[in-house]
Image (spheres, rainbow, N blue to C red):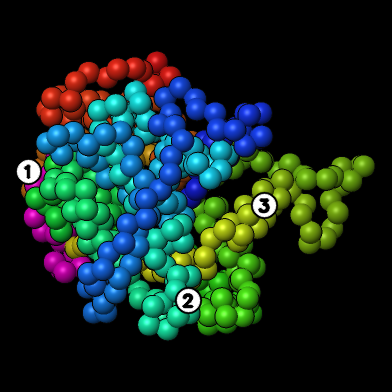
Amino acid sequence: MVPIPSPSPSSIPAASPAAERGIPVVPTGSVGVVEPQFIPFDQPLPLASGQLMPSYVLAVETYGELNADRTNAVLVCHALNASHHVAGISAANPKDIGWWDNMVGPGKALDTDRFFVIGVNNLGSCFGSTGPASIDPATGTPWGSRFPVLTVEDWVKAQARVADHFGIDTFAAVMGGSLGGMQALSWAITCPERVAHCIVIASTPRLSAQNIAFNEVVRRAIINDPDFHGGNYYAHNTVPRHGLSVARMIGHITYLSDDDMATKFGRTQREPTLDGDYRYGYDVEFEVESYLRYQGEKFSTYFDANTYLLITRALDYFDPARQHGGDLACALKPATADFLLVSFSTDWRFPPERSREIVASLVKNQRPVTYAEIDAPHGHDAFLLGDTRYHAVVQAYYDRIAARLGLGERKQTNGVLA
């Protein structure tokens, strides 16, 4: 997995006629219409690179209510091209449904009737938090290529300041899928006293050489685009759309399994000739090509190229065992949380073996850990979809957390699980 996928079309509810007219329609089990908060931080943030990030802003959404003891908070960490908009319907766009809306809401697996859920757009992203496209106060121009290189650990430091902002000493759980799972794991290691439960889904303790190679290819596609201008394309009023589009196409291929792609597209031709023969050219011939081009072109209209470079490099650098001679158990020794890990059988980017490696290291440290390996056909994208077995595992785990915290019974049942 590298970049993290936005929800595949099958996981996004179709817009209703009212939504098409711009009228928000709140389905059962939704947190409803939501708006982000933009929280400024004036204290510089020391980074792993040795640089300092001066004042910055983080975009945040919250769902549910924080209880009086501030013990029911859950942090949801996002993947590459997701954001703070975890659940609900955006007030700015009724077609914009949270990327994990099937997971988070009243009566859902992560029940907002009982938990206070926080979604944070990571520093360096392009959905409201300070990033490469933001204005550098020192120059009055966009940061561009001068924006500091970040790590997963840097994001955790910034997220801890969000927790401080809300007066949260310890999260009931920190949860994430893919790159979000890396952040959850980093929380358990670097801030053990602040995490009661760590939920890591479809993730890995480090990228394989193959994963790093995919990241390098997508970065080269962007950097070699003539409109990239060394990362300072803002000043040229250009966007490296071709590079971004290719990067997204490559990433999207890696999010799906071979079986899933065969089921969705097979070898179906887009517009076969009257006699069913090939067109013998280099334009779109197959449905899968059309789909990838559409995904790539759409992505290039809303995602920032510098952000893509920055986040893929953060993925490359994540390796908590590196400082411990490659010993993951040693790296995980500071963790005091209970763990839930979930993997998917057809996820070839972050395969189940990587989750089992984490589980084995936790067992070696005698940490309580629950592990589920879901046989699902959707590849890496499965963590975003509504597989009933997967959601049942997560729901049961949160029910245990709620019982321990005395947060009461579930008020309603998620329709998907009923």
Front residue of 300 and 45:
45
Q: Earlier in the sequence, mark 1 or mark 2?
A: 2
- The residue under label 2 is 142
Q: Where are the magenta residues, as a range?
A: 322-340
Tell me which corner region of the image, top left, top right, bottom left or bottom right, holds residue 46: bottom left
Q: Which of the marked residues, 1 or 3, is nearer the chain's N terminus?
A: 3
Contact between labelled residues 3 and 1, with CB atoms less than 8 Å apart: no
- Please identify, in this view, whether the residue under mark 1 or under mark 2 is nearer the observer: 2
Provide the residue designation for mark 1: 366
Residues marked 3 and 2 touching at CB (< 8 Å): no
Residue type indicated by callout 2: Pro
Tags 1 and 2 touching, CB below 8 Å: no
Tell me which amino acid carries mark 3: Tyr
Does residue 191 appear in this view?
A: yes
Badge 2 crowding class, 10 Å Cα cut-off, few under 14, some 14 to 19, many 20 or more, is some
Alpha carbon separation for disc pair 3 and 2 = 29 Å
Residue 296, image quadrant: bottom right
- Residue 119 percent location from the top left of the image: 34, 47
Question: To which quarter of the image does residue 280 belong?
Answer: bottom right
Q: Secondary structure at mark 3?
A: helix
List the residue tagged with mark 3: 294
